[in-house]
Image (tube, rainbow, N blue to C red):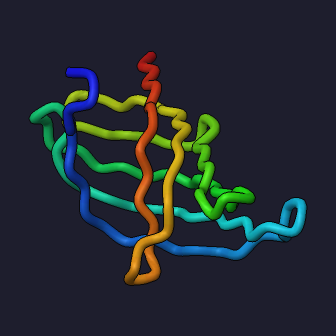
Amino acid sequence: MLGEKVGTFTGTTTDKVLPAQGGFPSFETSAQTSGKLAGVDVQSMATYSAQMQPDGSLYGECPNSGVVMTSDGAATFRATGCGQMTADGGAKFRGAVYFQTS
């Protein structure tokens, strides 16, 4: 399972530019999505931030500010990842997500 795609989501995002950190841009993104995670239908909401690094890459975090809901319950999550800007003005990330249930 390591390195395999475990979910697909589609939805809307809202972006906000934050004060620069060390002269590099910083962003905040809030997302509301739906899709499948490990074969289960889910709804998700999260807010995460990303900071541009000196080499142009991005470092992003979602520090305990995400929730995934299914028909059986909900889980919170946190995530970290590294990414890069895409040609169409978006960004793509690879990282780790840690889930917690009650």
Q: Which residue shows up at 60% across the image and 56% down it?
A: 58
**Quarter holding residue 54:** bottom right
Please determine whether, in this image, residue 102 is positioned above or below residue 71.
Answer: above
Q: Residue furthest right?
A: 22
Q: Quadrant of the N terminus?
A: top left
Quadrant of res 34:
bottom left
| Percent position of residue 76, x then y | 47, 32
In the image, residue 6 above or below residue 88: above
Q: Name the side, left or right, on which 4 lies relative to 49.
A: left
Residue 96, above or below 9: above
**Residue 85's x, y, as percent?**
49, 69
26 or 70: which is nearer to us?
A: 26
Q: Quadrant of the C terminus?
A: top left
Residue located 45% across and 62% down the image: 31
Task: Say which residue appears at 46% left-offset and 25% top-offset.
Answer: 98
Residue that sits furthest to the front in the current view? 55
How many marks the image carries: the answer is 0
Q: Nearer the viewer, residue 23 or 70?
A: 23
Q: Give the residue furthest to the left.
A: 39
Q: Quadrant of residue 23?
A: bottom right
Is residue 100 placed above or below 31 in the rendered structure?
above
Q: Nearer the viewer, residue 51 or 30?
A: 51
Left or right of 3? Residue 79 is: right
Which residue is the extreme one toward the bottom?
88
Q: Residue at x 13, y 36 (%)?
A: 40
Q: Residue 12 appears at what percent x and percent y?
A: 37, 72
Percent from the top left, x then y, of residue 44? 36, 49
1 vs 37, nearest the viewer: 1
